[in-house]
Image (spheres, rainbow, N blue to C red):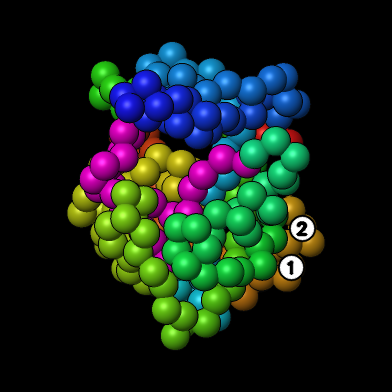
Amino acid sequence: MKVHCLEVKEVAEEYVILVDGNDNPIGSEEKVKCHLPNGKLHRAFTALLFDKKGRLVLTKRAKEKMLWPEDWDGTVASHPREGETYISSAERRMPEELGVSCKMDYLMKFEYHVPYKDVGSENEICGTLIGIVDESTKFKIVEDEIDEIKWVSVNELISEIKNNPKIYCPWMLIALKFLDKSENKTFEKHKNILSLWINSELQDELQKAIRIHLADDKWRLVK
């Protein structure tokens, strides 16, 4: 019986897409192996859901997570599978983690490499997506993925980052920092919302918070 359980776990192991510094696929590897302290560069995404007032949905990572447990993240972060785009992977993952479906638009992507204690690391090229949902949307908390969900305004997040920058996932901070680098077509489509978040005070606080997690040479915009 024990052997059977091990076989099921092995079959179910998730693989991620390995990439070079220009985001060209170069193979695949088990997700767990890619998140060890010297993890291999791979493809990921972070998806940000806003309402029409410009509030952002934040999620607290489940305490069972290997990396950054119980820290606040953007709405959903995960990894594209083989054959998926950044957009299609985010649209697949959204109902799996939050119980809602939403059309997503591509903003930009960035590379970053940051350790988490002596447990592991993130070494990713991370595509950033945006989606708009109604403020009355009912989310579902999925066990082992998310422990809490909340809406935040720009000013609320500024205050929270000032008070406790360490409790925010580094990729979320970087994604928000690079919103002004979004593709022109997407920026124009969501200008009313994105312009609220390209706020000089927020951008300053994001820069400070990112430096708590990783050095300036460990994150960059990817064209």
Q: Residue furthest top?
A: 38
Q: Is residue 77 magenta?
A: yes
Please identify the quadrant where the N terminus is shown.
top left
- The image's mark for residue 203 is none
SS class, disc 2 = helix
Q: Residue furthest bottom?
A: 136
Q: Residue furthest left?
A: 163
Residue 157 x/y as whole percent: 34, 62
In the picture of the structure, the residue carrying the numbered disc 1 is 188
Q: Is residue 215 visible?
A: no
Left or right for 195, reference 137: right
Q: Image point 46% across, 19% down: which residue? A: 33
Residue 88 x/y as whole percent: 69, 53
Residue 56 x/y as whole percent: 45, 67
Q: Are marks 1 and 2 in contact (CB under 8 Å)?
A: yes
Q: Is residue 88 visible?
A: yes
Residue 29 x/y as whole percent: 58, 21
In the picture of the structure, the residue carrying the numbered disc 2 is 184
User: Disc 2 residue type?
Assistant: Asn
Q: Image point 37% across, 21% down: which residue? A: 3
Q: Which residues are magenta?
A: 57-80
Q: Image point 72% across, 44% down: which residue? A: 84
Q: Quadrant of residue 7?
A: top left
Near-viewer residue (109 or 179) = 109
Left or right for 25, reference 138: right
Q: Image point 48% across, 54% down: which residue? A: 76
